[in-house]
Image: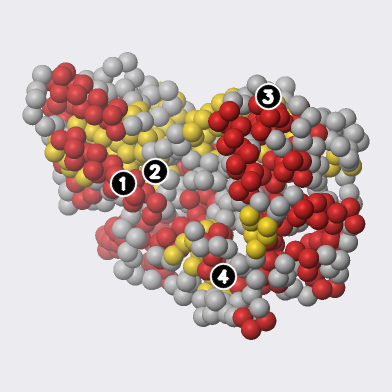
Amino acid sequence: MTVKEAPPEEIKREIERLVDELNYHCYRYYVLDSPVISDEEYDRLFRRLKELEEKYNYILPHSPTQRVGAPPLDKFEKVRHTVPMLSLDNAFSYDEVREFDERVKRFLGVEEEIEYTVEPKYDGLAIEITYRNGILYRASTRGDGYEGEDVTQNIKTIRSVPLRIPPDVPIPEEIDIRGEVYMNILDFEELNKQREAQGEPLFANPRNAAAGSVRQLDPSVTASRKLHLACYGVGACRGIEFSSQWEFIHWLKKARFPVPAYLKLCKGIGEVLKTLDEIGELRKTFPFEADGAVIKVNDFELQKRLGVKTREPRWAIAYKFPAHQGTTVIKAIVPSVGRTGIITPVAIFEPVRIGGVIVSRSTLHNWDEIKRKDIRVGDTVVVERAGEVIPHVVMVIKEKRTGKEVPPEIPDHCPVCGAKVIRQEGEVAVRCIGLNCPAQVKERIRHFASRNAMDIEGLGEKNVDLLYEAGLIRHFVDLYKLKKEDLLKLPRFAEKSAQNLIDAIERSKKTTLSRFLFALGIHYVGEYTAKLLAKEFKNLEDLYHVSYERLIQIPQIGEKTARSVALFFNDDKNLQTLEELKALGLQITNPEYRGEEEKGEEPLKGLTFVITGALPRPRQEVEELIERLGGHAASSVSRKTDYLIVGESPGSKLQRAQTLGVKTISYDEFLKMAGLKDED
Ligand code: IVH
């Protein structure tokens, strides 16, 4: 055994100086995000400290070397909170925030404006950190509010958590500081990527990732996660008094604690609501997820008078921003047959409110996707709905499984017509081969009539069903043979509604080539390809008997599409149908056709684009298109990026673009720039 030397005074002083210095640099780096020395310099000081500590066995409790290295635990010890950690009442609208203000005033018996603080609501894990005489003594989770778990060693690994309150601020004998441990969105995404690569279960959101990282028996796992702290509250406290939330937060700031990224003192509820607007905008630029804002009566004396209800204080409320995600249970997975016979699995949910809309179903895209995400009936899932994007299942929360969940079966017969179902080599799609499958026929007609196709107003799903069941339509050609008298015999139609539909059908006869091509529902011909074809071919007849070779010459058209279009226009029966439509009065113009002279334009010349999220076309294809039209397609966002094209489920590039002020556009907007879509 080696006996360590007792440290001479000057070594003690050097160690103390190094500890203070390193803690200060840690604060500059992790709390202020503004380091004043290089990483190398920090490492050098750290190594020197470690060396001295080991040599002289003189280790201060707040030494930065004490953040890591604690051995794993068998279990967490329980910790009782001296003052219970309450939860917050929620407000989902500004009206509810106003009602909160009225309750506060009524309770206090005052009429004058109340002073409130407003700060972001961090979506993480609530913890309490006790400091005794300025030294971090213990950290615990909220638990049930009365008793939590001792996670001291784990919390110490978070670099922004001060191990000591610096002596230049008033130091209380004992203080319980409360805050939220959270993970930034980019770090959460990175962590999930790593976990996916290692075949480990993914975290549903940054909150779960933060909570899972803190509740680790092995502190070295916590240390490997990028966690942050935001302090917003005080529990038990001896030896110092604060008169308000504002004063307390400013003490925290001086004492080098990380505080909420935004804090505002508001006189009256009007100012509070304005601040909520402001945070609602600002939060898009926050690197972390703020699911709301917390409004607190500023004055601690008033807080005391207001007191608590059962579990929530009367002096605070959390305003929740409209959510983009929600959690729900899959009640069933039903097969749905589309116009091309593809059978898509659709999840039926326990209805859930997301962003002010009730979501009760969403497509699961295809059966491979179900397998990949291991989605089962009975599963609890995270559902996302952002903006106009249709809702989709982000992931399954596997921890919620009871064992009773059942994977759905791929149907072997069409649920509508009973015909056999096939799955072609190399295709994920499962397809009904029923020639006269009513589901397919109805979907084809509905598609034909839809807004971006022939735009027949009033011919939605219900009316198509009705006309089909009545035997009036078996094909979209039949629409142009409908008579008002036929409609009047049906239950849903009266004189006016029948006339309206007849008029709408009549109006649809005047259309453009691109709309018409899209309406036909040719395999692989969406709106985009229909426009490409309209640019290339002057009129419909030019497409009759078109060859694969001719089509494949069009740069944006791939093999599958070329084959499908050629097949369609070389089928005599199809051509007969087109002629029949013309005979029924269809008039097609083609304003999109660009003659030879216009070819070779470069509408995107000099512009740099980056893509994030899923676009309606394969990414590679869109990138090729950008290049062909004179632009440049880059893979990551920088200041040089002109536009970020944002698809479904955008990734971290979106945030980066917002931070750098790079313009974001939708795929549709991009098509417009590229001259491939009508200007609205
Ligand atoms: S104050 C008496 N301020 O939200 C209530 N809480 O839904 C004390 N939270 O348990 C909480 N950000 O974990 C407060 N700026 C903030 C917050 C915040 C996040 C969490 C906290 C609390 C939960 C209640």
> What amino acid is at disc 1?
Ile
Is residue 297 visible in the rendered image? The answer is: yes
The quarter of the picture where residue 310 lies is top left
Measure how far apart labels 2 and 1 are at the Cα level. Answer: 9 Å
The quarter of the picture where residue 423 lies is top right
Where does label 1 land, which residue?
A: 279
Q: Is residue 643 found left or right of 588 in the rendered image?
A: left
Q: Is mark 2 on a helix, strand or loop?
A: strand
The quarter of the picture where residue 252 lies is top left
Is residue 163 visible in the rendered image? The answer is: no
Callout 2: CB less than 8 Å from ligand 1: no
Measure how far apart labels 3 and 4 are at the Cα level. Answer: 46 Å
Residue at position x 39%, y 43% in the image: 290
Looking at the rendered structure, which numbered label has been put on residue 674?
4
The first of marks 2 and 4 along the sequence is 2
Where does label 3 land, which residue?
A: 490
- Of badges 1 and 4, nearer the viewer stands 4
Measure how far apart labels 2 and 4 are at the Cα level. Answer: 36 Å
Q: Residues within 10 Å of mark 3 (few under 14, many from 20)?
A: few
Q: How far across and down, in percent of the image, does residue 510 sit?
A: 63, 55
Q: What element carries label 3?
A: loop
Measure how far apart labels 1 and 4 are at the Cα level. Answer: 35 Å
State how the image is colored.
secondary structure
Using the image, determine if residue 397 lies above or below residue 59: above
Query: In terms of depth relative to the viewer, which is nearer, 168 or 636?
Result: 636
Looking at the rendered structure, which numbered label has been put on residue 290?
2
Q: What element carries label 4?
A: loop
> What amino acid is at disc 4?
Ala
